Amino acid sequence: MSVVRFRSSHGTRYVFSEPAKACRLDLRLIPRRTPRQNVLHADIAITPRASNQRRWTDAFGNPCVSAVIDGPFRTLEIDAVALTSCSLDHKSEAAFPCDTSLWTTETVRTPALPSLVAAANDIAAAETASHARAAAVVDYVHRRMRYDPGAADPSRALETTVAEEAGVCQDFAHMAAAMLRTLSIPVRYVCGYLDTTAVAGRNAHLAEDDLHAWICAYDLKDGWVDFDPVLGERVDKPRVTVAHGRDFDDVAPVIGRFEGGGAHIMETGVSLWRA
């Protein structure tokens, strides 16, 4: 089977206004293995060095790293690198027994807003197959929403996204997931790295490497299939999946809990290239 290899680099840097006494990190920065993706190498470096660090797997099968860093320190750097092999034959992930109710239940991030329920029902009246409905919902979100980098906010509510009809990939994915779940279609929220060379000229905001979000919808016949609401289409090119869950809260790449440190700023940088 033809494959393409990607090298990825994901850096996060915290700068504190006062010395931090300690920090607890929960990281989802190591790409997960899937039927279409194999992780050949992955490593995470933390500076200052962690006094305690362990790897574990969360309830969704995502590889995680937890670490404790003792202070004092004014800067904290997290650098994750990986070499991932992705299948060029982007067929749907085969169906397998799973608790689909986990993926059809609304969450705080994906509430069943009345306007979205009405729009989803209109689509369901015109389409009968699950993945035809998924494709139609993704197209609806793509056409209705405006991509606005200035709206990037991890805590942004779906109500705000719908009212402003604007957002970033996270918001597009939450909106599509919310609509499909009202139709009892299981949906995963997926985060990972997009090969920007594969979408060159199709969306100016996706021209630079960054963490990206999309959805994966389930059908008993076709299994799990990826859709990208920002591009308005089914995913047909390799990309690196880092983690999946019910919404952003399940897959947040870096969660930091700090003791002291005063105010802080966080900087991130992502690079993806073919190996």
Image: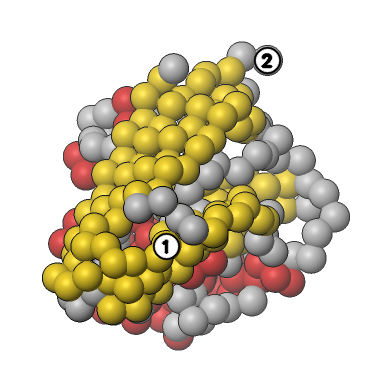
| Above-or-below relation of 268 to 206 | below
Q: Quadrant of residue 69?
A: bottom left
List the single residue furthest toward the top: 2
| Disc number for residue 1 | 2
| N-terminal-most mark, 2 or 1 | 2
Q: Give percent across and percent down for residue 46.
A: 40, 49
- The foreground one among 111 and 62 is 62
Are the two marked residues, 2 and 1, in contact with CB atoms closer than 8 angstroms? Answer: no
Q: Quadrant of residue 255?
A: bottom left
Which residue type does callout 2 highlight?
Answer: Met
Determine the secondary structure under disc 1. strand
Which residue type does callout 1 highlight?
Answer: Ile
| Above-or-below relation of 93 to 84 | below
Q: How is the image coloured?
A: secondary structure
Q: Quadrant of the N terminus?
A: top right
Residue sitting at x 29%, y 56%:
76
Residue sitting at x 35%, y 53%:
48
Q: Give percent across and percent down for residue 144.
A: 31, 62
| Above-or-below relation of 25 to 65 | below
| Disc number for residue 271 | none
Determine the secondary structure under disc 2. loop
- Judge the density around disc 2: few (<14), some (14-19), many (≥20) Cα neighbours within 10 Å: few
Spatial CA span between label 2 and label 1: 43 Å
Q: Quadrant of residue 35?
A: top right
Q: Which residue is mark 1?
A: 69
